[in-house]
Amino acid sequence: RMHLLETQTLKVDLSRREADAHAAALELQSATTELAGLKTRLEASQGQCGMLTEEVALLQAEVAKVTSEGLSATRRQQEAAAEAGKLTNDLALAAQQRDALAEETAAQRAEIHQLKVERDAVEASRASVGEELAGVKAELGRVKT
């Protein structure tokens, strides 16, 4: 009887241990399933990270392109400003030359006017001398007669 009781106790103990083992196996299976789900999520996240890394690289290339274009535009703007400054200086020089030519032209016109006045005076003097000469010739003709 004792032996029977001991056997039944061992059977109960064995059943309990089998139930514990079965529960542990179910927990292990659940943890394995959860781990597989986490692994799938990790792989998906890694794929997204890869795509985001590619997108970042494309955006960085675009930023570099836009920066280069901006620098090029700035350089062209500086060149245009320098050209505008040169043209402004050229215009100022041309205005100075124009003013100098205007002064020279005014001086030449004054000189031409003065020469005309002197020519008119010389012509008037010549006419006067011609009249005197005619008068002297007439008087000389009278004296001879």
Image (cartoon, rainbow, N blue to C red):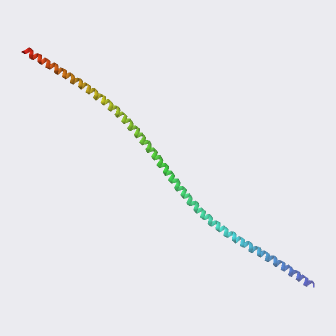
Q: Is residue 10 left or right of residue 28?
A: right
Drawn side of residue 22 relative to residue 134, left or right:
right
Farthest top residue?
143
Nearest to the observer: residue 27 or residue 75: 75
From this view, report whether residue 16 is shown above or below residue 57. Answer: below
Residue, x 16% and y 20% (percent of image)?
131
Residue 19 in picture, x, y percent from top left: 82, 78
Number of marks in the rendered image: 0
Question: Which image quarter holds the N terminus?
Answer: bottom right
Q: Please give the name of the residue rendered at 47% of the width and 48% of the height, measured from the top-left corner.
A: 77
The outermost residue toward the left is 145
User: Measured along the vertical axis of the image, is residue 145 above or below residue 18?
Assistant: above
Left/right of residue 90 with respect to residue 41 in the rendered view: left
Query: Looking at the image, which is closer to me, 12 or 106?
Result: 106
User: How far across and how far down the image is residue 74, in percent?
Assistant: 49, 49
| Residue drawn at (40%, 40%) of the image | 91
Across and down, in percent, residue 132 comes to 16, 18
Relative placement, left or right, of 18 versus 68 is right
Residue sitting at x 28%, y 26% = 114
Quadrant position of the C terminus in the picture: top left
| Quadrant in the rendering for residue 21 | bottom right
Q: Nearer the viewer, residue 91 or 130?
A: 130
Question: Residue 120: image x %, image y %?
Answer: 23, 25
